[in-house]
Image (tube, rainbow, N blue to C red):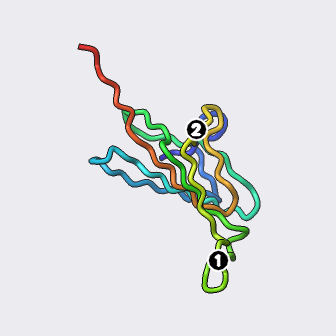
Amino acid sequence: MLLQDGDGKETACACLDVSATYHDEKGEVIGAVVNRHPEQSVTAAVSFVGPDRLDISEAIELNCPSWKTVNGFGVVDQVTQRTKKEARYNPENGYEFPPHSITLLKHRYLIEESAH
C-alpha cells in the first residue's frame, strides 16, 4: 500500500500507520489504517502495486471520543464500530480517515474475463 499526496506523489504521513494482509483463496486484501491524529481527519490515496485494480468492498471504522476512551465494566459503547458497505475511494483525494480511528478497508479482486 502506498500513500499519495494531492499531486499523486508517494508521501509519508506522520499520523497514519498502514499495514495490509492478503488472502489468496478469498481474493481479498485488507488494509488497516490507524489515524493517530487526535483532532484531524486525514485524506490519503491508497494504491496497490500489481496488475489488478482493487476497489473497496467494505470499510469498517473503529472510533471513540479520544485515544484515552475505553470500553469496560460499567463503561460501554464508548468505542464504536461503523461498517460502510458503500465506501469508495474518491478518485482525486483518496479515503478520509477520521481522527483517532482504526479503519479496515476490505478489497476484492475485480476479475475481468478476457474475450475469446
- Which residue is more in the foreground, 78 or 40? 78
Q: Residues within 10 Å of mark 1 (few under 14, many from 20)?
A: few
Q: Which residue is at the far left? A: 116
Residue 28 lies left or right of residue 97; in this view the side is left
The C terminus lies in quadrant = top left
- Which residue is more in the foreground, 78 or 45? 78
**Which residue appears at 64% of the width and 52% of the height?**
97
Residue for badge 1: 76
Residue for badge 2: 89
Q: Which residue is at the far top? A: 116
N-term mark: 1 or 2 = 1
Amino acid type at mark 2: Tyr
How far across and how far down the image is residue 3, in percent? 56, 45
Q: Secondary structure at mark 2?
A: loop
**Which residue appears at 69% of the width and 76% of the height?**
68
How far across and how far down the image is residue 39, in percent? 76, 61
